[in-house]
Amino acid sequence: MFNNISEVNIVRAVFIETLSDEFTAKTGVGVYAYLAPVDINQLFKEYLHQHSAIRTFVRRCVKFTLA
């Protein structure tokens, strides 16, 4: 999917930023108020195996976490 480690790191940063933005929009606080870094890393790994856009995947994660 990605050609090198640098690309994965960029995607990871965008993923975490998007996840935090979505939590902030829904709750007023960022992702780390709800999830530990290890959980966020697991979600990122799951995202890499999905065929959906980051925003779509993140919205499902936030909805599930807050349910």
Image: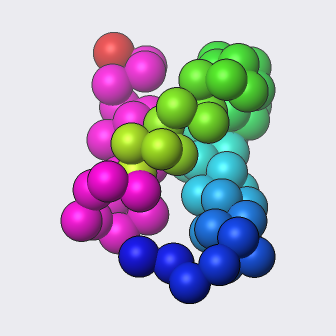
Residue at left 75%, top 76%? 6
Figure label count: 0
Q: Nearer the viewer, residue 59 or 46?
A: 46
Q: Quadrant of the N terminus?
A: bottom left
The colour scheme used to paint the residues is rainbow
* 65 horizontally vs 35: left or right: left
* 64 horizontally vs 18: left or right: left
**Position of residue 26 measured from the top left corner of the image (x, y, whole percent):** 54, 37
Q: Height in image: 48 above or below 24?
A: below
Q: Which residues are magenta?
A: 48-66
Q: Quadrant of the C terminus?
A: top left
Based on the displayed image, in which of its 4 quarters is residue 11 positioned?
Answer: bottom right
* 40 horizontally vs 30: left or right: left
**Position of residue 17 measured from the top left corner of the image (x, y, whole percent):** 70, 57
**Position of residue 66 measured from the top left corner of the image (x, y, whole percent):** 43, 19
- Residue located farthest toward the bottom when viewing the structure as drawn: 3
Residue at left 73%, top 27%? 37
**Position of residue 3 measured from the top left corner of the image (x, y, whole percent):** 56, 84
Residue 28 covered by magenta stretch = no
Residue 57 covered by magenta stretch = yes
Asked whether residue 53 is in view, the answer is: yes
Chief secondary structure of the magenta portion: helix
Residue at left 39%, top 42%? 46
Residue at left 52%, top 32%? 42
